[in-house]
Amino acid sequence: MSCCAPGAEMALDLNGATSSLPSSQEIRLASRSLGNDLRQTDLSVPTVHCAACIQAIETALGKLDRVEGVRVNLSTKRVSIHWRGDEVPPFAAALGRLGYPAHLFDPQVGEKDKTLSELIRAVAVAGFAAGNIMLLSVSVWSGAEGATRDLFHWVSALIAIPALAFAGGIYFRSAWNALRHGRMNMDVPIAVGVSLAYAMSLYETINHGDHAYFDASVSLLFFLLIGRTLDHVMRERARTAVNGLSRLAPRGATVLREDGSRDYLPVEEIEPGLRLLITTGERIPVDGKIIRGSSDLDCSLVSGESTPRTVASGETVQAGTLNLTGPLTIEATAAAKDSFLAEMVRLMEAAEGGRAHYRRIADRVSALYAPVVHLTALVTLLGWMVATGDWHRSVTIAIAVLIITCPCALGLAVPIVQVVAARRLFESGVMVKDGSAMERLAAIDTAVFDKTGTLTLGQPRLVNASSIDPAMLAIAADMAAHSRHPFSRAIAGCAGFAGEPKLESVSEHPGFGIEATAAGSTWRLGRRGWAGWKARSGGESRYGGTVLTKGGIIVASFVFEDALRADARAAVGQLNNARVSVEMLSGDTAAACGEVAATLGIHHFVPALLPSGKVEYIETLAKDGHKVLMVGDGLNDTPALGAAHVSIAPATAADVGRNAADFVFLRESLSAVPLALDVSRRAGQLIRQNIAIAIVYNAVAVPIAILGHVTPLIAAIAMSASSLLVIGNALRLQGFAASQPETGRSHGKRPSIGALARSS
Amino acid sequence: MTTLVYLIPVALFLGALGLSGFLWALRSGQYEDLDGAAERILIDRDDS
């Protein structure tokens, strides 16, 4: 697939977050009925990126039985399939065979971006009106007089009415909303300026006056709508990309009935007392107690512990943990709405951080700007009344002041910069979900990181591969390929030697390891005490306890560490250089945290924290006047993500965490965090520059308007010029982006080395 | 003046035509997969 170079990298990045294929019951549960026995399923396929991919997928799926239609959407990297019948056609498997891992995502039906289509329609209408009115205005400026000029004015007025009603409606509604709640936003002066300009022009037209500002009011709307639409498109793209990530929380579970029958029920319908079957590789859907079976559970997403926990019957399990090695039967002890996950969501909602009180720069500026402008207009009106006594002239000039100060440049100053910045971050795999997130990020002085899954990958890595006999390593890798245990995966990843004896009867013993027979002898890979049953006791070396044994004699031992995320050290250094103090909070043990902190050069960390402890810690920091950035991935971090001033989550984070965070980065490298901070700070600078430009423009233009020298021609030129200046200044951010080397890529994608969290 | 009486409506009509064409394209979903539309032109349809 050599054609697929562009975009392939992003696809690979996303790949890391995908889990196993969705089961057919899960697909059926997630599909929606279109009536007539027809059902639609949407799958996220992150690896499509060219015409060949589209064709391969559409033909392969189209050939399946009962599939009515297939359509790939390359922009959103999704495929939607229409199918009939009760049985789900095997599309996930078919896609898997083609080499396109697919997964389900939260569909969000009905929310199909109504705002975007409304905005685009408003831009189209405003553009049409602005173009035509401008043409008529040019004729007036070039000397149309008398009846001709009146005709042109009337035609302009007629075109402007639907444009204002339709395109301006967005601003009028927003302004009304703000005023009703006693607030002030940028849309208030816009709405006032536009409607007064229209009213005055209409009055002038009726009285055969020579100055009408229809062009100004409509082209103002047009410019502002373009900015608003771009802003929306950018955020929607980020949201779609985040939404397309695979869902980690299970959608349902297999329920074992009293009579032995099995049902697949959605999570919401699982009640306490029901017995659930959890196969390996599935996440536990609700809190429960193990009735039968033993296994290892990956709790990294839930508690932040990096070492899998061995569980046996009688123990309790938390929702959200991943079952690794053996099938389990559990009895649900809580419904989904009372489970750990739901509790985290409640904690998060309770811990609303700085963002609830945060007022965006644009709103803060307009709260000062609008009263000043409106007062200036009033004073102008009174001044001219006193000076000349001519009320018509006074009103005309006062309204001209309002038009010229109508914050076209000011309204564009913020969104345009944020669009350019968000685009720059998008290209580096960082999704910005909220417009105000960059403003908040630029203000931070403390960055708090979670350990497992954020600073580290949450996956162990084999460190002593080079000192192990390659033949032994190959056998171990062969055995390990049969298991989902993170240590096994790490060993299997080191394979690279063929010709070892063929393995027979591989079996996995949950909590202990893997057993296989090959060439007449028994091999075991697992805990030292279990695998090396003939070894002398007391032989626990300092390397901990995963060994490979042949007939009970240890032939190799393996040492693991929790691999650091790529560039973690560099990222911490860059943040320190940017005068941000870096701290670490973790649910893991003090020893494990200490090693990571020492490797990364983090001076301050707090281990063994409960989710509420993280929130309290962040709230304490906030009370001391710090602006805190929280970076975390686990369910246990979610409340903290909500409590912080601004939050970042990796793509591998739990679903709730990804939805709660302001930024989500898709690539493995942690350099996304300093990059986001850097771009946000530069964006903040440019926003302030832009606002300064807009104010300077007003300082020049307002005296001219007050003195009564503004004609529609001058207004049009001044307004367009200031808008162009502001847009041009915003684009400088893109220039900066091109000249900067991409830190994430120059260091490569290899996990960086450091002895960490040694575990057995 | 008399020329304006029909030229202005003609100009506005043509503009409105373009606008309605755009809105129609938007409604019929032609803007939903811009990247895909660019790539699909490379796919040969085998109508045989």
Image: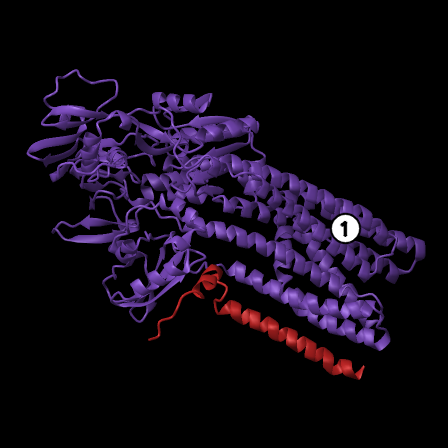
Chain colours: A purple, B red
The quadrant of the rendering that contains the C terminus of chain A is top left
User: Where A254 sits versus A507, above or below?
Assistant: below
Q: Of A200 and A414, which appears nearest the observer?
A: A414
| Residue denoted by label 1 | A374
Q: Residue at x 26, y 32 (%)?
A: A308
Q: Residue at x 38, y 70 (%)?
A: B45
The quadrant of the rendering that contains the N terminus of chain A is bottom left
Q: Residue at x 61, y 62 (%)?
A: A123
Q: Of A214 and A358, which appears nearest the observer?
A: A214
Is residue A116 in sight in this rendering? yes
Percent position of residue A556, x then y: 19, 25
Q: Would residue A734 be found to the left or right of residue A56 on screen?
A: right
Is residue A432 in sight in this rendering? no
For the residue marked with disc 1, what is the amino acid?
His
User: Where A704 sits versus A121, above or below?
Assistant: above
Helix, strand or loop for disc 1 = helix
In the displayed image of the protein, which residue is found farthest to the right?
A388
Percent position of residue A194, x then y: 72, 59
Q: Of A171 and A101, which appears nearest the observer?
A: A101
Q: Would residue A482 be found to the left or right of residue A350 on screen?
A: left
* Category of crowding for the residue at label 1, using alpha-carbon neighbours closer than 10 angstroms: few (below 14), some (14–19), many (at least 20): some
Q: Would residue A85 be found to the left or right of residue A346 on screen?
A: left
User: Where A506 sits versus A712, above or below?
Assistant: above
